Image (cartoon, grey):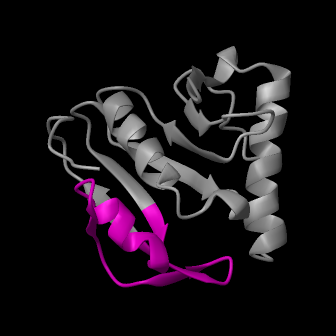
Amino acid sequence: MTLHSALGPDLSAADLYALLKLRVDVFVVEQDCPYPDLDGRDLLPDTIHVWWQPGAEPLACLRVLGAPGTERRVGRVCTAAQARGAGLGSRLMAAAIDHLGPDPSVLDAQLPAQSLYARFGYEPQGAPFLEDGIEHVRMRRPGQSSTAWRV
């Protein structure tokens, strides 16, 4: 199986390094957006990492923050340039929704990705805003059954 998930404390050093490298490659290098990716949340006990790794390196990843039973946050959703267009974002989001269960959640979507998140029940909340020089919109998914979405 090439879809993986782990709680922050359960990540191996090699897996954490590979996920951080992918995020830096996409957000910092490709999108020319230096930001503090190392925010202290990756290894928290409630953080869930989900990633797609069919070979030696992960090609897509995301993380879910927050304790079950609260409003949670999906973030750091990214796909390597060479793997885009293969539906990996949808596979990751389906897995994230499974982890979220009935809990409500929020995310900050880059505007071009808004339709991806809308397929999973996320709705825009407020006006677009700039984050690190890139237009985003806050999107919220109310608490619901995890079977309410379609890939």
Report the quarter where the N terminus lies: top right
144 or 89, nearer to the observer: 89
Q: Give the vertical position of 144 relative to 133 (above or below).
A: above
Asked if the stretch drawn in magenta spans residue 121, the answer is yes
Q: Quadrant of residue 20?
A: top right
Q: Give the vertical position of 3 relative to 141 (above or below).
A: above
Q: Give the vertical position of 86 relative to 137 (above or below).
A: above
So how many labels did they put on this image? 0
The residue sitting at 77% across, 31% down in the picture is: 16
Q: Report whether 103 appears left or right of 83.
A: left
Q: Give the vertical position of 126 relative to 59 (above or below).
A: below
The residue sitting at 79% across, 72% down in the picture is: 30
Q: Quadrant of residue 33?
A: bottom right
31 or 60, nearer to the observer: 60
Measuring from the top left, give residue 41's x and y in whole percent: 65, 37
Asked if the stretch drawn in magenta spans residue 144, the answer is no
The residue sitting at 74% across, 63% down in the picture is: 26
Could one spot residue 88 in this view of the protein? yes
The residue sitting at 26% across, 43% down in the picture is: 104
Residue furthest out toward the top: 10
Measuring from the top left, give residue 76's x and y in whole percent: 60, 53
Measuring from the top left, give residue 65's x and y in whole percent: 50, 38
Measuring from the top left, give residue 99's x and y in whole percent: 38, 29
Q: Report whether 91 appears left or right of 25.
A: left
92 or 20, nearer to the observer: 92
Boundaries of the magenta span: 108-137
Could one spot residue 37 in this view of the protein? no
Q: Report whether 58 appears left or right of 148.
A: right
